[in-house]
Every structure is written in structure tokens, then in C-alpha cells.
Amino acid sequence: MMELRYGAPTEYSTNNGEAMYHFHIADDHPLFRSALLDIIHQHFAQATISESSDLDSTIEALTNNKEIDILLLDLHMPGSQDLFGLVSVREKFPSVPVIVVSASEEASTINRSIGHGASGYIPKSSSSQTLYNAIKAVAEGEKWIPEIVTTPLTAISREEKSLASKIATLTPQQYRVLCYLREGWLNKQIGFELNVTEATVKAHITAIFRKLGVTNRTQAVIMLSQMSLEGET
């Protein structure tokens, strides 16, 4: 069982003899990716680092490279709204530890991210010291919770876990279509936005209904809304 480590100051390590890791940074913000790169280069001198800026390329990287040891995942990069990116990665690549990096410091978002399989959660406002501490903890097989969480984490309900498993079966394109359905878009509008035919949109909607076990748009949208992260930025 993983040890649960809450954010606490530790000394910076300057040991370049750390175990060799392959980190993958999935974030569409260049400045934050650069900050993570600097920290990893400084403290994990022999590490391999790969990057992506959207969910599609992240899943592709994980599929094509079985050597990735730790994924640092932005909750809200392109193709990944709310918890979709996290639950998709955990469903498809359950052996890869995931550290969520997010602008949100909402306790509920942190709780649900850990509940859905994240090994750590790093608010983007964290100091370089904290970023390193979190990465090191997860690399050592522990879980990392930021200090801002002052109450015990609560378990995710069986119903939400079941819903997450269904949502995770959607392809990124199907998830995009579902998000447009939530916004009330028509098939023609969705097709224009995604540069596909209306027939393709209808095929995606049929697949979405089948995977979610629903029969209409309203039911599908309600299921999606249950996975939303209120207050996430």
C-alpha cells in the first residue's frame, strides 16, 4: 500500500545518482512545462523526459512508449476537460502513476482526483521546492497531497467510479462531441466545428449512447455533468 505523504518541507536533494526515470509532462502551458523540466533536470539528472500538449498526443505517447514511469497530467489541456483525461489514462494505462497538475486548489477537485487514481496532486501555484518534493514522493512509491488539504480525503462513491469507467471508454473525439451536446449544439454545428460530416457526428453519438448505456442526449449530458469539476480553472 502506498504511503500517503502530505506536503511538508524537506531538504532539496542534489544527488545526481537518483534512479533513472522516464517522466512525461502533459500540459499545454509552455511556461509550466518549462518549470517542471528545470526541476526534473536539476534533481533527476539521468531522467528521460517527453512532452505533450493535448490528450490525444498524451495517449499516443503512453501507447507507444512503455518505458514511461510517471505522467504529470494537466487536468485542463486540450481534449481533457474535468476528469476525462485522468480517468481515461487510468483506465488505459493503470500501471503508470499519474501526478495531476492543475490551477485549481479546490479541496473537492483534489479529493476526486486522488479518488480516481492520481498518485499525487500539485497546484500550479506551488513553489519549486514543493514541485520537487511531490515528484520525488511519487517516484518513491508514495502518494502526495498538498498542504492546503486540511481534512481527511473521502472515498469516491461506487456510482461515480462506475460512471468514470464508462466515460473512460469514450475516445477523445467522442468526448468532444459529448461536450458539444452539453452545450446544446446541433449535429450540423458539431460537424462544422470538428470538420466532419453530420453522418460521422451521428455515428459518434450512437457510440456514446451505447458506451454510456443511455438512449438520448439528455441522459448522456446528465452523466457528463456528474463528472464536472465545479470551481476548476
Image (cartoon, rainbow, N blue to C red):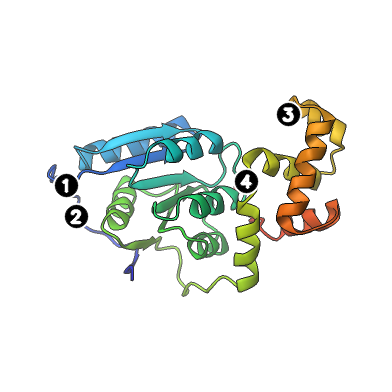
Residue 5's quadrant in the figure? bottom left
In the rendered image, which quarter contains the N terminus? bottom left
Residue 233 falls left or right of residue 97: right
**Residue type indicated by callout 2:** Glu
Q: Nearer the viewer, mark 1 or mark 3?
A: 3
Q: Nearer the viewer, mark 3 or mark 4?
A: 3
> Mark 3 and mark 2: span between their CA atoms?
49 Å
Q: Is mark 1 on a helix, strand or loop?
A: loop
- Determine crowd level at label 3: few under 14, some 14-19, many 20+ residues with C-alpha closer than 10 A: few
Q: Name the residue under label 4.
A: 81
Q: Name the residue under label 1.
A: 18
Q: Which of marks 1 and 2 is in front?
A: 1
> Residue 142 at x, y = what percent?
31, 63
Q: Which residue is drawn at 83% across and 32% down?
A: 199
Of the two numbered discs 3 and 4 on the same chain, state the one appearing first in sequence: 4
Q: Mark 2 points at which residue?
A: 11
> Mark 1 and mark 3: span between their CA atoms?
45 Å
> Mark 1 and mark 4: span between their CA atoms?
34 Å
**Residue type indicated by callout 1:** Glu
- Judge whether residue 230 can be spotted in this image: no
Q: Residue at x 86, y 54 (%)?
A: 216
Nearer to us in this view, 114 or 32: 114
**Residue type indicated by callout 3:** Leu
Residue 218 falls left or right of residue 142: right
Mark 3 and mark 2 residues within 8 Å of each other at the beta carbon: no
